[in-house]
Image (cartoon, rainbow, N blue to C red):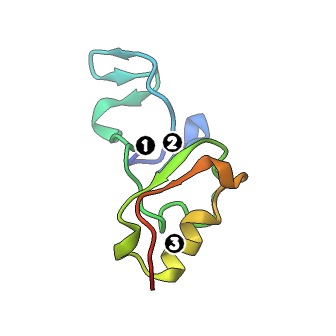
Amino acid sequence: MLREHYEKFGYFKNYEFVVSKIEGEIVNEKYKLKDIEPAYCLTSQNKQGKTINEAYNIYESKKMTFENIQTAIGRATDFNLIHLDGIRKN
């Protein structure tokens, strides 16, 4: 995920992409290594307003408010894409 804007390429902070090549300090022939960070775990607030078309996990749901769970679940285009790690019983 980008930590900085790259307007000349049309990408902005928080843009998510797959790293396919790293040469020295350059990633995917565009980005400086220092300007990216792994996006292996994101918050539901980070995904608010975005659509997810691939499988994903919701971890520590027992610690989340109902509104946070609703936001996390509401991002999926298909309910079968979601794995919920623990379900609230109250």
Q: Which residue sits at x=66%, y=49%?
A: 80
Indicate which label's residue lies in the foreground, 2 or 3.
3
Closer to the chain start, of discs 2 and 1, is: 1
Indicate the amino acid at tag 2: Glu
Give the image location of residue 3, x and y in percent: 38, 48
Mark 2–mark 3 distance (CA, rounded to whole Å): 22 Å
Give the image location of residue 44, x and y in percent: 48, 65
Instruction: Please say if the residues under marks 3 and 1 sit with CB atoms less than 8 Å apart.
Output: no
Q: Is residue 38 left or right of residue 1?
A: left
Closer to the chain start, of discs 3 and 1, is: 1
> Within the image, what quadrant is residue 43 found in?
bottom left
Q: Which residue matches tag 3?
A: 69
Q: Where the N terminus falls, by quadrant?
A: top left
Q: Which residue matches tag 1?
A: 1
**Is residue 47 placed above or below 40 in the rendered structure?**
below
Indicate the amino acid at tag 1: Met
Query: Which residue is the extreme one toward the front?
Result: 89
Q: Which residue matches tag 2?
A: 16
Q: Secondary structure at mark 2?
A: loop
